[in-house]
Image (cartoon, helix red, strand yellow):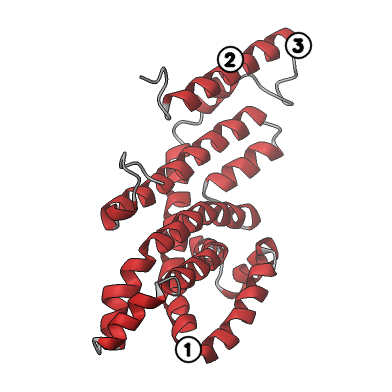
Amino acid sequence: MKLLTDYEFPLVVIAGLVGLWEVLCRMVRIPVWLLPAPSAIVRDTWTWADRIPGHLWVTFYETVGGFAVSVLVGVPLAIAIVYSPLMRRVLYPILLVVQSVPKVALAPLFLIWIGYGPQSNILIAAIVAFFPMVVNTAAGLESVEPDLLQLTHALQASALRVFWKVRLPWALPHIFSGMKVAMSLAVIGAVVGEFVGSDRGLGYLILTASSNMNTAIVFGVMAVLSALGMVVFWAVCLAERLACPWYLPPDGGAP
């Protein structure tokens, strides 16, 4: 029997690091504005307990919205790339150009074009997240065994039937891998949008606290943001477990 499970060991390590952090801050007397102790972070963050939930909901809404847009746009684009050589030649260069542009540079343009509000942050999150959706989905659709495709051709199956019965199920693990990356990136994209221009969201709280040299609040909100990222990531892992259980390891855990 293992002394610690795969989930308990990281928690023990984190708890040890937090304890060491607390001891060092008290012994060395590091200024609070430079590196607050964990106890100070918890104490100061608790004073903002009435403000954080509303801003957390905004960031969650923007993250899920951006992720949904990336999936709804990325999957059809990947299908077009796989099934049409012309679309592959046209879309891939455009995707590479969009991916290479720093998203922070696009944020002010979205504020001008779309306006001030969560819609621009959702768009930023979608642009940050959709590239792995396209790449992973296309890779999954193209990873079908050639012998299996030859068999469907011999059985005279239609292209639509081959897609629904062969290509899509085969590509599901790749699609969910892209979703997990996209969801993590959507959190980053939403916060980037809130940094550039927003009066709501966890990114806005971090920016406000840092401008006031309230480092403890910055750390506290970052912890909340990390928790949000883990929750939405695990939600995608749960969806993967339900959609393609044949892909999971024998213990049933998420990959």
Q: Residues within 10 Å of mark 1 (few under 14, many from 20)?
A: few
User: Is residue 23 among what the camera can see?
Assistant: yes
The residue singled out by tag 1 in the image is 84
The quarter in which the N terminus is drawn is top left
Q: The residue under label 2 is which amino acid type? A: Gly
Please tell me which residue is depicted at 40% across the width and 77% down the height of the picture: 146
- Relative to residue 179, is residue 214 depicted above or below? above
Front one among 134 and 112: 134
Residue 173 spot, x, y in % from top left: 39, 60
Front one among 111 and 16: 16
Residue 13 spot, x, y in % from top left: 54, 22
Please tell me which residue is depicted at 53% across the width and 34% down the height of the picture: 223
Q: Earlier in the sequence, mark 1 or mark 3?
A: 3
The local secondary structure at tag 3 comes to helix
Q: Residues within 10 Å of mark 3 (few under 14, many from 20)?
A: few
Is label 2 or label 3 in front?
Answer: 2
- Counting labels gives 3
Q: Residues within 10 Å of mark 2 (few under 14, many from 20)?
A: some
The dot on residue 177 is: none
The local secondary structure at tag 1 comes to loop
Quadrant in the rendering for residue 219: top right
The dot on residue 19 is: 2
- Relative to residue 104, is residue 43 depicted above or below? above
* Disc 1 to disc 3, C-alpha distance: 64 Å
Residue 198 spot, x, y in % from top left: 58, 55
Q: The residue under label 1 is which amino acid type? A: Ser
The residue singled out by tag 3 in the image is 28
